[in-house]
Structures are given as C-alpha cells and as structure tokens.
Amino acid sequence: MSCAALLALLSHDLKAILAYSTVTTLGMLIGFYGLGTPLGVQGDLLHIASHVLFKGALFMCAGIVDHATGTRDVRQLGGLRRRLPVLALIVCVCAASMAGIPGTLGFVSKEYFLKTLVGFLHSGHWLAWYALILGALALTLKVAFSLRLAGHVFGGKEPPELAAHFHAPSPLLLVPPALLATGSLVFGLRPQWLGELFAPLAVNGLHAPEQPVFKPFPDHWAPEVGLGGGILVLGALLYLGITRRAWSRLSIPDGLRLDLAFDRAVDALPRAAKRITGALRADTPFDYLSIVMAFVVVLTGVYIASRPDLWLPLPGAADFDPLRTFVAGLIAVAAILVLAMRSWTAQLIAMSIVGFLITFYFVLFKAPDLAMTQILVEAATLVLVLLLLARFPRTAEAGEHETRSGKLRLLVRITLATGMGLLATLVTIQALKPKHPDFAGAYYLANTVELAHGTNAVNTLLVDFRGFDTLFEISVLLIATLGGVGLLMRHRRSRDEYRAGAMALPGYGHGTRFEKSVKEDKA
C-alpha cells in the first residue's frame, strides 16, 4: 500500500498516478481483511463505494484532459481552471475525497480506516505499530499526490505549448464525472443513505445488520480524528516542500519500475527458453532421447533395487528348452545385425527377421492366432517401410554415416539400450504374474462355450466378450491403412528433385515447381 502510494507520488502521467492510487486502495482493503477486526471487515463496502465514486470520476477527467490537450504529463499541464472551470471543480471535489478532506465520502472511509488501525493497536499485537505507521505513511503520500493532481493540472500558469493543441471538450462529457463527484459529496454528508442502498449486499456473518460504518463521522473526538488531521497537514507540507524543489527532478527508480521488469522478463523469456532447450538437448532428438532413457533407467533401477520382491529369480535347469533357446539366440543375432548393417534396406530386412522369428516363437508356445497376426503385421510393415524408404534420395542415407559417434557416446547408448531392454523384460514378466486370485482368464475359459457358443477362447474373447474393443481396434487399423494408402499415392520425385538430393522435398512437387521455389529462396 505504501509502496504504491510512493509510486503514485513519483509518477508524472495522470493515469499512472490514478492507477497506482488504485493499488494503494487495494492494499488497504487487503490490510483490512488481514487485520481481521470486525470494524475493518464490515467497512469494506464503504471503502469500495468511496473509491468507486472518486476514482471513476478522476479516470474520466484524465481522459477528458488528454483529449483536450493531447498529453497526460502533469509537467506539461497547468492553468486549465480558466479553460475548463467545471472540470476543475469536479477534479478538486474528487481529489479532496481521495485525500480524505472532511465533507466527502473519502473522509468517512479514511477515518474508519484509521479507527480500525487504532483499534488493532489496542489489541497489543506486536505488528500493530508497523501496520499503523505504514497506513499513516500511505495516507500522507495520498494527500500529497491528490494535491498535485488538482494543483498541477488546473493551478499555476498555462504552458505556451498547451494553447496550440487545446480544444474544448463537449459539455456532455462532463456529466458522468459530475454525477460521481456529487455522489462523493452527498454520501459524505449522509453516509447512512449509502448504507440503505448497500443493505441488500450485506453478507451474513461478515457485515453487521445495522451497518455501523455508514454513519456520520466523527460522532466524538476520537484519537483517529486527530491522527487524520495530522496526516492532512503532513501531506500538505510534503506537497509544498517538493513543489519548491521542482517535481521534475522526481522519478520512479528503475528498481521499482515493475513495467520495465516485466518487459525485460518478456524479452529474456525466449533467450532463457533457448538456453534451457540447448541444455536439455531437446532440439537434438538422439541426445534428448538418451537423457529421457537414462532418467527412466536410473529411477526405475533404484526403485527395483529397493524392492527385493521384484527381483527376477534365476532360471534353473528345468526351465531350459533347446529349441526355444535356439530361436531366442537367432532373434538376438538378428537384432545385432540391425546395428551392424549400414544400409537402410539391410537393417529393415534384419528387423523383419526378428519379427518372423518371434512368429516362430509363438508357434512353439502353441499360439497360432498370435503367430498369424504377427506374420500379417510384419509383412505389411515391411512393404510399407520399403516403399517409404524408396522415396528418399541416396544422399539422405549416405548423410547418416558422415558423422560417427565417439566411443564414449557409443558406450552410453549401449548401456542405455541394455538397461531399457532389461526394464522392458522385467515389466513384461511382472505383468504376466496374476494380480488377483480371481483371474479374469478363468472366467472366459469357463463360460466361452455356454455364453459365446464357441470352443476357441481367443476367438470368443475378441468377438463376443470384448467385441467393442475389437471394433475400435479395427477402426484404428483402418485409419492406419488409409494413411498408408495416402502415402503411396503421393507424387513421385521428379528428376530435378532427385538431382537436388537431400535438399529436395520427398515427393511433394514436380521439377518445375521445385526449381521455382529454389530460385525464390536464392533471390
């Protein structure tokens, strides 16, 4: 509250002064709720009404002054009382209410604010003097900038530059602020009328039924009355003292220019984001993927190490099967070939060998349905990826091997890949363990004949028990198929695009259009 009042005093823009004074009032309201005294909480409607009346009128008057003179700088204004006498009267009334001059609603609000602070002082709380000093300081500064608002705009001499730009506003523009200024005077003399208007807004348990704050003040010479008078005197002396030393020397320190700090933060945000992106390697997919995988492996490894029940038991001699072990070895060899091969086509064929060997592994476990599905998926994937790779130029494949990874980076990748493989194996084995004594598969096996009228539990599970799941999965496959067909129907590369190599767009245009875009880029 005091900080905002100081910023209002140091500001030279009319609307900046009014905006900071609004922050001062908001701080006062928050202070009321923070003190928690009954009188302070019940007076919130009074303080809001007082602020609305004088501040709404002052903002409109600031707009009228800006429209008539072309500036809102208080240092370039003055002497407008001769050209705009009615507006000067309105601003003086509202500034008096903002400063808390007797006879205005702002005076009633200010005195009840001081009454709340004095009452809190009597409570003996160790922060009571702190609250009273800051409140009195804010009100003193408020008196000073209220006097400046009226005196520097309408008092003194009129600057020569002002006459060249001045044009009188329409008299109708003065009606709304005049009504608000009249309300500040009328309700300042008869606050009980305002209490009757605000009675429907009272909140049960928060505001007293009789609204004690909406009464003429003071009803007796209480300490807060003398304190309020002293604040008026100190505020006037502060205004006169600064006037002698020239207001133009005052300005808001850069450390308190929150608008500059916000602009600097906005300008620094892209630079900070770029640095964070570079530090996290988010713009380098291989490095970023390594960071994510390392985090997953380390975090999961620490968790598994602390849970002995998750450790996998070592296989015994009874678990050894020569044929299955041989197939698993072939799968491992094919996976190593994927890493050893340099050609994209050879790598893809090695990956397909892994898939087809997994199909044979399903056959060994007597799962023909899974084997058939795996064969279809592998065949379709092989054809689609081969067609996709055929659309890339040879330079794209050759560029992959121009930069080779160092030994340390290669060792890190091997370690992460091994860790992710072990993690996937552990998760798969843990998922296969029954989690509940009433296993869901037992229900399907027991009811597949009676309810689904079929002897193949896999078929009845997919078609009958989980038919909607199968329908949605087929829909996903259909969408993927349509996407694959769309890729196949794209335009083929032209000869000019093939000559351009990696700089050409893969299958997105004909040669003439591509050459035109290249010429435009060079231009």
Image (cartoon, rainbow, N blue to C red):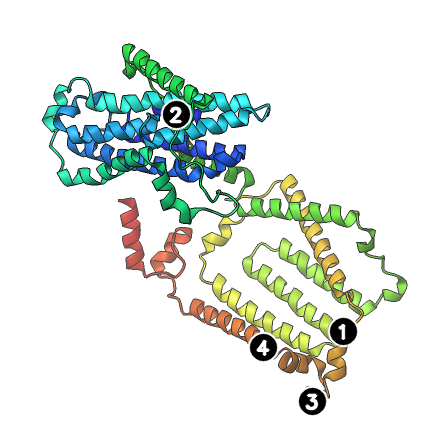
Numbered badge on residue 468: 4
Q: Secondary structure at mark 2?
A: helix
How packed is label 1: few (under 14 Cα within 10 Å), some, or many (20 or more)? Answer: few
Q: Earlier in the sequence, mark 1 or mark 3?
A: 1
Measured Cα–Cα span from mark 3 to mark 2: 83 Å
Nearest-to-viewer mark from 2 and 1: 2
Is residue 36 found left or right of 513 in the rendered image?
right
How packed is label 2: few (under 14 Cα within 10 Å), some, or many (20 or more)? Answer: many
Measured Cα–Cα span from mark 1 to mark 3: 25 Å
Q: Earlier in the sequence, mark 2 or mark 4?
A: 2
Q: Earlier in the sequence, mark 2 or mark 1?
A: 2
Quadrant of res 268: top left
Above or below 187: residue 458: below
Numbered badge on residue 453: 3
Name the residue carrying label 1: 365
Amino acid type for the residue under numbered disc 2: Ala
Q: Earlier in the sequence, mark 4 or mark 3?
A: 3
Q: Earlier in the sequence, mark 1 or mark 4?
A: 1
Answer yes or no: is residue 310 visible.
yes
Answer yes or no: is residue 253 visible.
no
Q: Secondary structure at mark 3?
A: loop
Amino acid type for the residue under numbered disc 3: His
Name the residue carrying label 2: 5
The answer to the question of whether label 1 and label 4 lie on touching residues, with beta carbons closer than 8 A, is: no
Is residue 340 found left or right of 43 in the rendered image?
right
At x 31%, y 59%, the residue is 511
The answer to the question of whether label 1 and label 3 lie on touching residues, with beta carbons closer than 8 A, is: no
Is residue 293 found left or right of 233 in the rendered image?
right
* Count of marks, rendered view: 4
The image shows residue 92 at horizontal and vertical percentages of 25, 27
The image shows residue 62 at horizontal and vertical percentages of 24, 32
